[in-house]
């Protein structure tokens, strides 16, 4: 039969393991919740940025969008071509 000291040690180790498990599970749950909140915030921020870009694009005057053929004059546009823009500006200044 095991001595009293060994039983106390066993039960202490079991209790410490249970307490550590509860603490560790709580920290994992908190980290998961924070990550979900961060993902939700990033998604909302992305939607806001898209809306701002679409609003800015819709409010540009027609002359700023294209002038001198099919040259896009808006440097924020993804299809902006600097060389073509400079050629049109040079032609206008002659």
Image: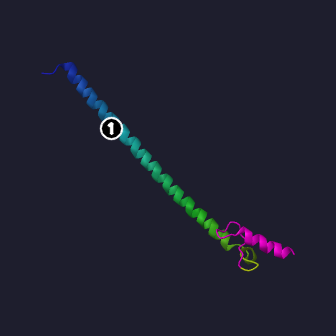
21 sits left or right of 87 in the view: left
Above-or-below relation of 52 to 24: below
Q: Which quadrant would residue 81 be assigned to in this image? A: bottom right
Q: Residue 67: where, in percent of width, then height?
A: 75, 78
* Residue sitting at x 60%, y 67%: 51
* Residue sitting at x 54%, y 60%: 44
Q: Which image quarter is the C terminus in?
A: bottom right
Question: Which region shows up in magenta?
Answer: 70-94
Residue reaching furthest right? 94
How many marks on residues?
Answer: 1
Residue 84: in magenta span: yes
Q: Residue 62: where, in percent of width, then height?
A: 73, 77
* Viewer-closest of 60 and 88: 88
Secondary element type, mark 1: helix
Query: Badge 1: how crowded within 10 Å, few (<14), some, or many (20+)?
Result: few
Residue 2: in magenta span: no
Residue under pointer 1:
21
Q: How is the image coloured?
A: rainbow
52 sits left or right of 68 in the view: left
* Residue sitting at x 44%, y 45%: 31
* Viewer-closest of 26 and 92: 92
Above-or-below relation of 83 to 41: below
Q: Residue 26: where, in percent of width, then height?
A: 38, 42
Q: Which quadrant would residue 22 be assigned to in this image? A: top left
Q: Which quadrant would residue 87 be assigned to in this image? A: bottom right
Q: Residue 34: where, in percent of width, then height?
A: 47, 48
């Amino acid at each position: 039969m095991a001595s009293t000291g060994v039983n106390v040690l066993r039960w202490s180790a079991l209790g410490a393991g249970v307490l550590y498990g509860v603490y560790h599970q709580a920290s994992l749950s908190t980290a998961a919740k924070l990550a979900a909140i961060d993902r939700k915030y990033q998604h909302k921020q992305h939607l806001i940025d898209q809306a701002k870009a679409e609003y800015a694009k819709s409010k540009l005057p027609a002359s700023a969008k294209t002038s001198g053929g099919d040259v896009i004059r808006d440097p924020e546009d993804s299809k902006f071509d600097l060389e073509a823009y400079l050629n049109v500006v040079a032609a206008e200044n002659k």
